[in-house]
Amino acid sequence: MAAATDVNPTRMELIKTKERIKLASKGHKLLKQKRDALILEFFKILKKAQDLRGQLAIKMAGGYRSLALAETYHNMQELTKVSLDLRKEIDIDIEVRNVMGVKIPNITTKMEERHFLTLPTYSVAATSAKIDQAVDDFNEILAMVIKLAETETAMKRLIIEIEKTKRRVNALEFVLIPRLEEETKMITFRLEEMERDSFVSLKSIKRKLEKEKKDKEAARAAAA
Amino acid sequence: MKSKIVVVGDAPLVMGFKLAGIDDTVQAGESTIQAELEKVLANKDYGIIVTNEYMLNRIDWRLRKKLDSIAYPVVIPMPDYTGKSTEGDEIRNLIKRALGFDLGAKKQEKS
């Protein structure tokens, strides 16, 4: 790696790099925990969600068909009139929950269940079964949509966050930490090398000095 | 936080949800969906926004990103009459990428 070779081989740099490794591994550990917690949460929601999307698509196709049929038997005005009688109160309570920094909606609903046969809110005589079918279908779809709202957004948000966290964990584990370790190895190696180098040169200087001294003494002895 | 459901979409979607008893509906075409969605977003009474999937794919990417990133309100794209939906596939792909296994395949094995 390029970065490992062009570091300053100084003791200061070594200390700094070691500090960075410590910090990186701490961050790595934390991120790993975050990832695990997110995945746990994700599977909790996944159990609730099952295959809602697929079911909804099928139901929706049926709903559109029955609605189209109702529209052909009755005109738009009549359908609108019927729909005015069908208004109902739906209590939706949305709380934003924070899971490891991911904001996910928590939805609780209270819907009064009113079946159109037990409690007809529109004229049964003036309308046909086509409308009943459409109303029934869309009531089911509505229930599914509410269930879907609970799970889908949360799932999507969680999975995106999981991916991000996972990428960070991997980047730390496989790129940053190995590189820093390489750097420390490089620096210690260079430092040792320099130490040996200076040791050897000191030795040779000493040897030279001693030899000079001996020569001088020998010269003095010869002169005397 | 008490909130309501609002439907923003084409005529069949709006009519259908009217029959299901939803009072707040906004009929929009592909050209007006952006403005209508922004209007609905500004109203904090609405907690769940139901809309057409094919229309949601037409809006500005900035608004799309905003819709994807906020926790409130929740936006639910509905499949059209063909019953096809890219939304489910999208989530499944995300799961596959993040966790490394295909959820759809697993389910088929089970059944």
Image (cartoon, rainbow, N blue to C red):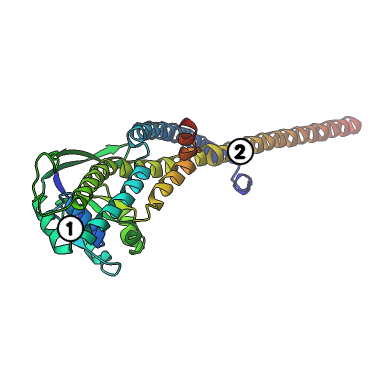
- The chain that hosts pointer 1 is B
Q: Which mark is residue B105?
A: none
Q: Locate residue A160: give its quadrant.
A: top left
Q: Indicate whether B39 appears above or below B22.
A: below
**What residue appears at the point 36 percent right and 60 percent down from the top-left corner?**
B57
Picture coordinates of residue A119 (x, y %)?
A: 9, 41
Q: Nearer the viewer, mark 1 or mark 2?
A: 1
Mark 2 surroundings: few (<14), some (14-19) or many (≥20) residues within 10 A:
some
Residue B99 vs B65, above or below: the answer is above
Q: What secondary structure is marked by label 2?
A: helix
Query: At which x and y percent is residue B42?
Result: 18, 58
Q: Which residue is mark 2?
A: A182
Graded by Cα atoms within 10 Å as few (under 14), some (14 to 19) or many (20 or more), the crowding at tag 1 reads some
Question: Camera-side residue: A104 or A21?
Answer: A104
Chain of the residue where label 2 is placed in the rendered structure: A
Please say if the residues under marks 1 and 2 sit with CB atoms less than 8 Å apart. no
Instruction: Give the spatial CA distance, label 1 vs label 2.
Output: 62 Å
Please identify the residue farthest to the bottom as the structure is shown.
B31
Give the residue type at disc 2.
Answer: Glu
Circle 1: element type? strand
Give the x, y percent position of residue A125.
9, 51
Q: Share a chain, discs 1 and 2?
A: no
Is residue A93 visible in the rendered structure shown here?
yes
User: Residue B68, image x and y in percent?
Assistant: 33, 52
Does residue B3 appear left or right of residue A38 in this picture?
A: left
Amino acid, disc 1: Thr
Left or right: where does residue A54 sit relative to residue B38?
Answer: right
User: How many numbered marks have been drawn onto this rendered protein structure?
Assistant: 2
Q: Nearer the viewer, residue A133 or B1?
A: A133
